[in-house]
Image (cartoon, coloured by chain):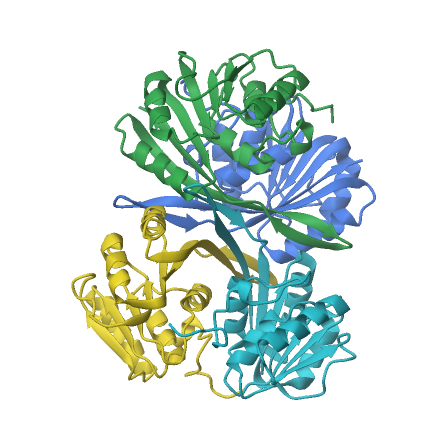
Chain colours: A yellow, B cyan, C green, D blue
């Protein structure tokens, strides 16, 4: 098999520069990207990009589109820049700033929210204005409250259809001698919907 | 967003023709495909293809490669053919038959096992002979015993490295009036490794 | 081992009369009862008793106390009565009615909520008035929204301490020939707190 | 509510002295004890007692019976002794030693295996000899291999019936400001059976 460092899907977590920024684990990244239903020319926005792992994979799939990634914390943003550089993705546009005020005024095929900073309703409003018809809105939530707010916001908005809520829990085997001990990763809610 | 019926990733379960054949759910499909690390020209084999949902998505990603899919049950095989047709994938090569005796004698970048038919050891032997160096071997197992056999077989084979065992459990929200009841899908083990 | 039909803990689901009433599965029942921290003379209220499986087990542990069980649906209530009869628990007091209006005006050591009927806030108010100091309040929730409301209600009430939120997901092996296929039961939130 | 420090069920993890010994978490303890179906006069053996949390809770339920607890690691054994002392359980008989050679030659109503030390088959043989008819055998396993061995051993032994395999995964809410982040505990297999 060829070097797949720059392939379009399935990057292992170890492919990314980590720093101390939170990183969506590969399995959740795979599911999240699948809910975004990207095409090669999709324009994408990643809100709360963290280490940029989802931004990078989105930029690999949507290699003829643009992928904006916004992150408000400087240390995570620097890790994000490092990963942009590592994967040589010219179609990534990093933004150091806050949602919703620093979000770009562009037309988008998909928005993914990795961190809402307490601004879920404002982000949903932004999505209504900036997603194309049929555009995908995907939220990763690690708290019950964020999941609840995303569900309420999307189910309550006439502009969205096909609101889907899933929860994913992955455990990973760790070798203990010849034994395989299953270690749990934290569960995550993935809430998605489509703009009418 | 454009019609993504033939897009390279993220097909919802509803995109497929179902029949009564077992179908890997979209979230597990996304994770499984990510473990296969496909490139556009990968050659792939899906053992126990069932309804062909993984075969089809692999064929969309590896659109310049070939994807063999083998299934031993006729009714599932017919569903598989129906899905090949629906997605117009000329690069899918369906095989009605049994592993290992009916497996193709070709060089492969990735092998995925959705059903081993009790032949895990023989399939691992086949993989050693037919995977390229760096090629990926991925098993989806729904039983403890199949997971155990795949783990033992791969850990015990010097030819493989990076044996990874994960278990994935997804729950999906069902609307009960204004409430979102979480319904569990069965957990699945995803065991993967790389040929040295 | 002696006939443990009337033992104080660990009744299998098959011990209960089922009908069509929803029944908390044995593993969740065990966890729920453990969060209630019952003593032999505890007085307990089960709101949304369903088939009465938690009521019965609580009545076996608190065999010198009283256990009220309220259920609003007649068919479930009849299953509940059947189970009261089967386990010969004279200390169970069944109520056919609605929360909060039909809840008993008694002092309680533990309240468990299996179904809130959309009245979580009213039930929490009732709990503040009727639990003794140190009394336990335990909610089983199958929807994100009910979990959210219970968490908010308890965290927001100065009267409670030690608010704990857990989510439990159990899978059960089903024999497929010599193989053990893991089948998932729906995840459940168990939210508990103690009255100051 | 009365001081329930010495109550028969539902001790929180914080009630125990911890040291560095591994401790079964309260939710898994509750399920494990429920599978043991203890009566007040049950005689019990805990193999791989660790910190003794299951031993202690079993001794509280089976307060007229005896509970042997065996642990091979000295530091864990010392934590176990500390917990025996803390809960003033005279009916606990601690053993520092190895299974199967140091297991007591007594008749038992229930055996729980928290750690098999690679001796699952030998322990199952011991159980056949020492459990009363109807006695319960319960294994907690954190590795795929131990689960597999317990399942095979019990299903393959004519002496046992009602072999049950479950897997439990619990997540626990951690407060992040006003939000509740769900943190996963490692999944555990609970395999149980009854001696004919």
Quarter holding the C terminus of chain C? top left
Residue at (57, 52) in percent of width and height? D142
Which residue is the extreme one toward the right? D158
Q: Where residue A194 sits in the image (x, y, percent)?
A: 38, 62
Residue A173 against residue C107 in the figure, above or below: below
Which residue is the extreme one toward the left? A101
Judging depth in this view, the residue of C154 and A120 nearest the camera is A120
Q: In which quarter of the image is residue C8?
A: top right
- The number of numbered badges drawn on the structure is 0
Residue A87 against residue D114 in the figure, above or below: below
Please say whether residue B156 is visible from this viewpoint. no
Left or right, residue A148 beside residue A30: left
Residue at (56, 34) in percent of width and height? C24
Left or right, residue C70 beside residue D191: left
Quarter holding the N terminus of chain C? top right
Residue at (29, 69) in percent of width and height? A45
Please say whether residue B98 is visible from this viewpoint. yes
Judging depth in this view, the residue of C42 and D59 nearest the camera is C42
Q: In which quarter of the image is residue D148?
A: bottom right
Residue A10 against residue D24 in the figure, above or below: below
Left or right, residue B76 beside residue B15: right
Q: Where residue C145 sits in the image (x, y, percent)?
A: 39, 41
Q: Where residue B65 sits in the image (x, y, percent)?
A: 57, 87
Q: Where residue C143 sits in the image (x, y, percent)?
A: 44, 41
Judging depth in this view, the residue of B59 and D119 nearest the camera is B59
């Amino acid at each position: 098999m060829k070097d797949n460092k720059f392939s379009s899907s399935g990057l292992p977590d170890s492919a990314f520069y980590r720093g101390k920024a939170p990183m969506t684990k590969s399995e959740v990244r795979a599911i999240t990207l699948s809910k975004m239903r990207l095409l090669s020319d999709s324009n994408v926005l990643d809100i709360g990009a963290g280490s940029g792992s989802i931004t990078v994979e989105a930029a690999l799939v949507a290699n003829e589109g643009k992928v904006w990634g916004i992150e408000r914390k400087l240390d995570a943003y620097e890790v994000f820049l490092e990963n942009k550089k590592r994967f040589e993705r010219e179609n990534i546009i990093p933004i150091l700033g806050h949602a919703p005020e620093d979000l770009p005024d562009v037309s988008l095929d998909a928005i993914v929210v990795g961190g809402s900073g307490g601004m879920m309703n404002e982000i949903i409003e932004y999505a209504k204005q900036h997603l194309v018809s049929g555009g995908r809105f995907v939220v990763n939530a690690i708290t019950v409250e964020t999941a609840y707010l995303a569900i309420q916001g999307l189910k309550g908005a006439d502009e969205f259809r096909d609101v889907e809520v899933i929860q994913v829990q992955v455990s990973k085997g760790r070798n203990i001698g010849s034994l395989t001990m299953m270690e749990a990763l934290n569960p995550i809610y993935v809430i998605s919907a489509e703009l009418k």
